[in-house]
Amino acid sequence: MKVIKNKSKDRDKIDELLTRGVDRIYPSKEKLEEVLRSGKKLKLYQGFDPTGDKLHLGHMVGLRKLAEWQELGHQVIFLIGDYTATIGDPSGKLSSRKMLTHEETLANAKNYKEQASKILKFDGDNGAEVLFNGDWLGKLSAVEFLRIAGNLTYSQVIERDMFQERLKQGQDIYTNEFLYPVMQAYDSVAMNVDLEVGGKDQMFNMMMGRKLMRNMLKKEKFVMTTKLLEDKHGVKIGKTEGNAIALDDKPEDLFGKIMAFPDEIVAQCFESLTTIPLEEIPTKDPFLNKKQLAFEIVKDLNDEKKAKEAQQVWEETFQKKEIPSEMEEIKAEAGDILSEVLVKNKVLASKGEWRRLVLGRGVHDLEKNTDITDQNTKITENLTLKIGKRKFIRIIKK
């Protein structure tokens, strides 16, 4: 009876593995489910390019899914794209990324394992394996790379949406960006995996890997894409979007930043970032839902004691000041003068009004819990401001 019960639990976990936070599965959910029901254990991975030194909540979506696979006994690889990060993934980008040196990407990745260990298990039985794609990509000769690239066609790569959009806008597509999907695709071949996990914005690159494995290894690779955390403007929460929340942020900062989330993203965050059963995800009170979400995430990334302390700090600092969960959002470029942005968007009538407010300590940075005292303050990060007694504004850095 005990064995049957465990099998039943595993079946339920398989259902959740294939649906929770999942966007699509290639070639199909049914084929992958058939393999999993057979009891076969798979070798799978997700790649993380260290273009910055912090893993953020966007990464946590994939880490959660990897942890689910790991819990069911599958072999998980946490791949650090130290080599691909020197190029920069063009996915979703309408302009080229800044190229990094290999030394810079290795420095960025220095604490990735420690940060990922908040969700993924690296020690003990069935611990996740950490690999660096520079170990194989960095050893390829020019001839070897060209032979690999010869398995994919120009028409297959140029068809991706952002390349077509750039061509329409008359923007350049650099050769290194064009070849990025080939390099990422070869990761699957080099590790000889059965499945790759990644955000749905990575679908093109992952499908290139599927084609390359079919051509080079005569093997079918499964691809699982996860849903993205996107705000109401369709902008994903990620480090290149200027609204990232790092996994190792201080608990009180993490709690406060999650409380600043727009209401419409909360349900998706519960699904993708927590382990709360789907049928128990709260839906009634947006404010209380968000507070529970913040508590759960802080608890999972730290511990329950720190989550309680973070909630207490937030309530004492912010809730008693009656800060609304919803407020006007304004997008601005990095380097813009804050006063000019506020006047332009009719938040303030004039720069004179701005000067009077600043001199009277009437502009408060709610993220840092400090007054803005510099009349020439420039926008370098996202800001949540209380202006005067009743006006609340969120500035989103593009």
Image: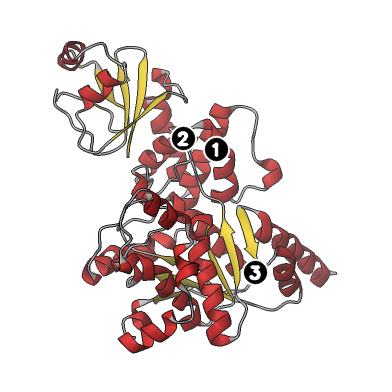
Label 2 vs 3, first from the N-terminus: 3
Percent x, y for residue 320?
A: 41, 20
Q: Residue at x 65, y 28 (%)?
A: 284
Q: Does 236 sit above or below residue 15? A: above
Under mark 1, the amino acid is Val
Percent x, y for residue 33?
A: 73, 68
Q: Does 52 sit above or below residue 366? A: below
Query: In front of the other: label 2 or label 3?
Result: 2
Q: Residue at x 54, y 58 (%)?
A: 64
User: Local crowd at mark 3 within 10 Å, few (<14), some, or many (≥20)?
Assistant: some
Label 3 vs 1, first from the N-terminus: 3
Q: Quadrant of residue 362?
A: top left
Q: Quadrant of residue 18?
A: bottom right
Q: Secondary structure at mark 2?
A: loop
Under mark 2, the amino acid is Phe
Question: What colouring does the structure picture have?
Answer: secondary structure
Quadrant where the N terminus sits is bottom right
The residue under label 1 is: 266
Q: Residue at x 31, y 85 (%)?
A: 142
Percent x, y for residue 116?
A: 43, 61
**Drawn side of residue 103 relative to residue 40, left or right:** left
The residue under label 2 is: 261
Q: CA distance from mark 2 to mark 3?
A: 32 Å
Q: Residue at x 40, y 74 (%)?
A: 183
The residue under label 3 is: 72
Q: Quadrant of residue 196?
A: bottom right
Under mark 3, the amino acid is Leu
Q: CA distance from mark 3 to mark 1?
A: 27 Å
